Image (tube, rainbow, N blue to C red):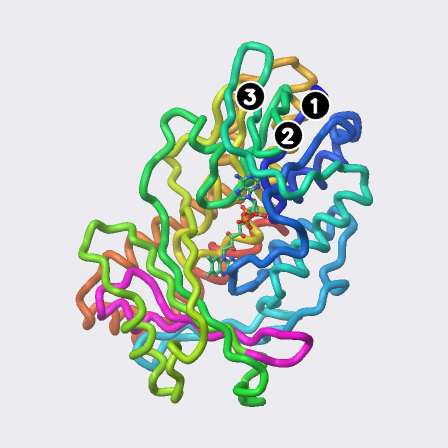
Amino acid sequence: MQYDVIIAGSGPAGASTALHLAHIAPEVAQRTLILEKAQHPRPKLCGGGLLQDGEFILRRLGMDVAEVPHVEVKEAHFRFEGRGFFIARQPVSFRVFARDLFDKWLIDTARKRGIALREETRVLKVVPHNAGVTVETNNGTYTARAVVGADGSLSAVRRAVPGTRTGHTARLLEFYIPPEHTPATDQDKGIFDYKVIGQGVQGYVWDFPMLIDGRPARNRGIFDLCMYDTPRQDLRPVLRQAIAQDGIDPETYPLLSHPIRWFDPADSFAAPHILLVGDAAGVDPSYGEGISFALGYGELAAHELKSAFAQNDFSFTGYKARILNSRMGVILKRRRNLAAMLYGIRTPNIQRLIWWRLNFLLKWYVENFLIDWAK
Ligand SMILES: Cc1cc2nc3c(=O)[nH]c(=O)nc-3n(C[C@H](O)[C@H](O)[C@H](O)COP(=O)(O)OP(=O)(O)OC[C@H]3O[C@@H](n4cnc5c(N)ncnc54)[C@H](O)[C@@H]3O)c2cc1C
């Protein structure tokens, strides 16, 4: 069957593109198909922290995240060698979801709104041509006027977009502390600890509350942006050492890894008949926030698709400007600049100056210039 749009991947970016299409261009949505390599509910390695920006976007679609079980994090603490600042937003600083449940809720809602989904179908190759695009999968070949690459950091669709940057992926390791080993304290606090910058990591270790089978657990991990071409540390011993003071050996628990592709305004985000969204396009470099940005990309892509069908022009030459000039694009650029500054400073005394003495400035900047972009 010939589709109007094929969306590769049904994480937040793919689901958001579909939900926004159903909202603003129902005639296109009716002829849209999502191809997903896995089957929902499928595991997705993630801290699961959703800032209010994600909620704002979903609320405009008539969706309430309260429908999905989650932990409310009241305080987000940012620190370097024990000192820094914390942010306490109302009603919550962020919410932590199990991604299998959150993503299933998103895609189930898209299905209820008329979007077709084909699971266990992996996109292998995308070939654009004059009339549209051919999508080769393990389950047959599909054609459409446009394809949306929402297939994550290791995107297959991205390979068909000329001029995309290589590298640009952060390394992450994550593990879960099960409920039986989780202390009952601090279930409303999330911690970002930047002390590992001193060990050559361009990032931080995190400690988030989470739910496993509805019971309090912890989610811990390490983020290394890999923006600068410095020797790559082995993250396992760095993580082990960073959390040893809490009496935890991460080797006790299965340690999992997955990259995050980060945003670069000089990157390519589209080609004729192809759009990239979410991790496939690049998300926040400052601390790897990706869920709300994936939702935001979906909104922009749906508007781009709507005008492409209205004008019968699938060159998508304006998509990059649409991203960069959007409120989301402006924030992504700011976060990239902050990351370049923060992770470029390898002198511990200057880091201490920033975190210990200028922490009020950093807090003010984060609260006023880096969040609430989707309000
Ligand atoms: C360890 C870790 C912790 C993180 N913690 C947070 C956090 O706390 N908060 C936050 O905001 N962000 C976090 N992120 C980032 C966040 O997970 C991503 O930015 C977000 O999931 C991006 O959404 P997406 O829809 O673009 O991609 P994904 O969520 O990766 O979804 C891609 C979908 O495409 C499917 N797919 C992949 N390849 C193909 C293919 N070839 N064909 C068909 N389907 C395919 C996948 O199965 C998946 O369903 C974290 C990431 C990692 C790795």
Q: Could you tell which of marks 3 and 2 lies nearer the N-terminus?
A: 2
Residues packed near mark 2 inside 10 Å, few (<14), some (14 to 19) or many (20 plus): many
Label 3 residue SS:
loop
- Residue underneath mark 3: 273
Ligand 1 closer than 8 Å to label 1 CB: no
Residues packed near mark 1 inside 10 Å, few (<14), some (14 to 19) or many (20 plus): some
Q: Could you tell which of marks 1 and 3 lies nearer the N-terminus?
A: 1
Label pair 3/2, CB-CB below 8 angstroms: no
Label 2 residue SS:
strand
- Residue underneath mark 2: 6
Residues packed near mark 3 inside 10 Å, few (<14), some (14 to 19) or many (20 plus): many
Residue 243 picture location, percent across and down: 36, 80
Q: How far apart are marks 2 and 1 (CA)?
A: 7 Å
Dot in front, 1 or 3: 1
Q: In this view, does 152 lie to the left or right of 163?
A: right
How many marks the image carries: the answer is 3
Judge whether 169 appears above or below 313 on screen: below
Instruction: Specify the segment rendered in magenta.
Output: 192-217
Q: Which residue is drawn at 57% across and 26% down?
A: 135
Residue 28 picture location, percent across and down: 74, 26
Query: Is 112 a magenta residue?
Result: no
Q: Label 2 is placed on what type of residue?
A: Ile
Q: Label 3 is placed on what type of residue?
A: His
Query: Can you tell which mark lies on residue 3?
Result: 1
Label pair 2/1, CB-CB below 8 angstroms: yes
Residue 17 picture location, percent across and down: 65, 38
Q: Distance between the residues labelled 3 and 2?
A: 10 Å
Label 1 residue SS:
strand
Residue 276 picture location, percent across and down: 51, 34
